[in-house]
Amino acid sequence: MLQTLYQVPEYKEELIYPAVCKMMEGLGIAQDIRPGLKVAIKPNLVMAKSPAYPVTTHPFVIKAVARWLREQGVEDIVLAESSGGLYNSEYMKNVYHVCGLRQLEPEVKLNMDFSAKTVNCPGGFSNHSFHIITPILEADYVINICKLKTHAMTGYSGGIKNLFGTIPGLEKPQMHYRWPDIQDFSRMLLELAQTVNPQLTVIDAIDAMEGNGPTGGSSHPLGLLLGARDFYTQDYFAAGLMGLDPMKIEMIRQAVEKGLAKPDEIELTGDPVPENLTPFQLPDTHKLDFTGAFPKFLQKPVAFLGGKLFKSYPQLNRELCVGCGKCAESCPAHIIKIENKKAKFRRKGCISCFCCQEMCPMKAISVKKAL
């Protein structure tokens, strides 16, 4: 697998665009491109947040990719994403505005088609079908531009996880409720990734996120842009750059076991990996992992018992809560209510997906262990 890596120290167009050009050349993307091609760019726009924070894909990275496409004669470029909340005109217009994406127009069309279509899956998949946003399905070529982050539920967020944003709006919490176990949820993500199957994945790691990602963490700049056709192996590689053990990230482990990720075949091109990389801080949900101290045959039962005793639950800081209702809106188990302008949680029924923490704009939700 050819993995391109370029050092880009900061978000400046004059630095990002040359790196994108080298990336496209190194991967031979020009061979895929022709005038008249319909291209969909899938960024990470998990919530309405300024690009000054490492929460969403930076608009300069999207702009550089779109500029390169237009120079190849591609004119039909749409930015397609379903954020963590509602999937409608009013909600997405605000997301586009706050995330700084209006500057992409008219070179990039910001999607205003909020329909979705059902796509049947191959035999053998646990999911018989997926409901996917229309512009992704109508594109001839999909470019996945994600943000490198740690993640409270999955541990890591990159190319595979970013494709969860092709599921429309509040159908995403339904998927969490259907697959509450991390093994099952990760399998669903891999099946969705195989269904969408983007032709190119770019990872924005110029400024990445550590800690309580995907929205409540802190900045951890890597000064890197990564590009690959094989995003499964790319995620393995990128997790390693963060100081994570890729085989402890369930979706990556499954990708390796299924033969989707091939870490032994990584061929790095571009710039060398910086020598001064430091490990990323883990999310609070992943800090208590003691299974590695046990023999391999005991790790699964220990993890099962530990999961019961040390299960994580969301905890509200009432002083920070403003009663906006984003947590209740995103809760797949519907156990959160807004009372007296404050969120109120019920532990019974909680599946510990931390969608509430992910969508809280005030960082008012933290992690509490049962024991």
Image: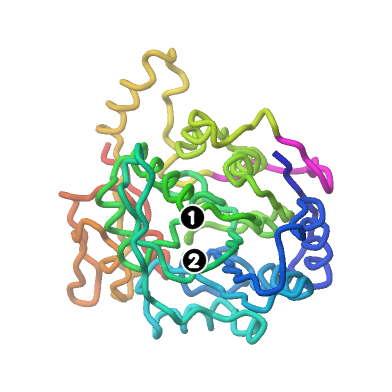
Tell me the residue that label 2 is attached to: 136
Tell me the residue that label 1 is attached to: 196
Dot 2 amino acid type = Ile
For residue 184, the mark is none
Q: Left or right: where does residue 109 sit relative to residue 195?
A: right
Other residues around mark 1 within 10 Å, as few (<14) / some (14–19) / many (≥20): some
Residue 279 part of the magenta segment: yes
Mark sitting earlier along the chain (1/2): 2
In percent of width and height, residue 160 lies at 51, 49
| Residue at 30% across, 35% down | 310
Residue 28 part of the magenta segment: no
Label 2: element kind? helix
Please state the extent of the stretch shown in magenta in the rendering.
266-281
In percent of width and height, residue 316 lies at 30, 60
| Residue at 60% across, 38% down | 236
Q: Give whichever of 69, 273 is nearer the camera.
A: 69
Dot 1 amino acid type = Val
